[in-house]
Amino acid sequence: MQTLLPGAWLELDQVALLWWQARTAAPAVQALMGALTLLGSAYAVAALIAVCAWQSRRLGQGWRHVMVLGLSLALVYGAVAATYLGVKQLVQRERPFVALALPLPPERTEGIAPASSFPSGHAGNAFMLAVLWLHLHRWRRWWLWLGLAGCVGLSRVALGLHYPGDVLGGALLGGGVAWGLLRLPWMARRLRIAG
């Protein structure tokens, strides 16, 4: 149901996608993009929760605090994922590899719903992770973490799985929902106690 998005936006999105794909078509660059895209997966979210729990425990905090931290981070992820999955269901934008008939390897598109392009869940996860990590570490090296999240978004476009607009939407949604939840006093207090 692409009619929910303005026609000029769709055209600009396609032009930007094809431009970026032409510049990232080399096999070595595609391999790098394939590795970068993993940083926006559910596995990366689980890894961040595990690293934060390990850091918390290493700093001498009790198991109760570690559990509070893990559950709080999982709650943020659940809220972000539920939001972007709900928007995907509402918009039902065709993926670029379907709409533009891009010749992608079958293993890259296996298990991906064809009408689930907007917003990018990987970009949402990456920016959520960046916001959470920066919050827990008091915004040290903010440029590195936000830049890395941006690279995840660019990888999704390079791989032909999302349009740039999908990535922008996912980034705003993931980062925005995470930031909003961290503004809630009960969430901020739990992460401060645990982290």
Image (cartoon, rainbow, N blue to C red):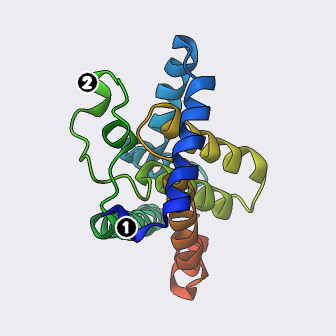
Instruction: Give whichever of discs 1 and 2 has the lower sequence position.
Output: 1
Q: Callout 1 environment at 10 Å: few (<14), some (14 to 19), or many (20+)?
A: few
Residue underneath mark 2: 106
Q: Nearer the viewer, residue 181 or 23?
A: 23
Write the residue at 64% across / 61% down: 136
Report the front residue among 28 and 165: 165
In the rendered image, the residue lying farthest to the top is: 27
Q: What secondary structure is found at the residue carrying circle 2?
A: helix
Q: Residue 3 bears which disc, if any?
A: 1
Type of amino acid at the residue the image marks with label 1: Thr
Is 144 left or right of 103, judged from the image as shown? Answer: right
Q: Amino acid at mark 2?
A: Pro
Residue lying at 32% horizontally and 28% vertically, measured from the top left = 108
Alpha carbon of mark 1 to alpha carbon of mark 2: how far?
Answer: 28 Å
Q: Of 34 and 18, which appears nearest the observer? A: 18
Report whether residue 78 is seen.
no
- Which quadrant: the N terminus? bottom left
Left or right placement of residue 29 versus residue 142 in this view: left
Viewport quadrant of the C terminus: bottom right
Question: In the picture shown, does residue 134 fall above or below 111?
Answer: below
Which quarter of the picture shows residue 44?
top left
As drawn, which residue projects farthest toward the left?
111
Does the image show residue 116?
A: yes
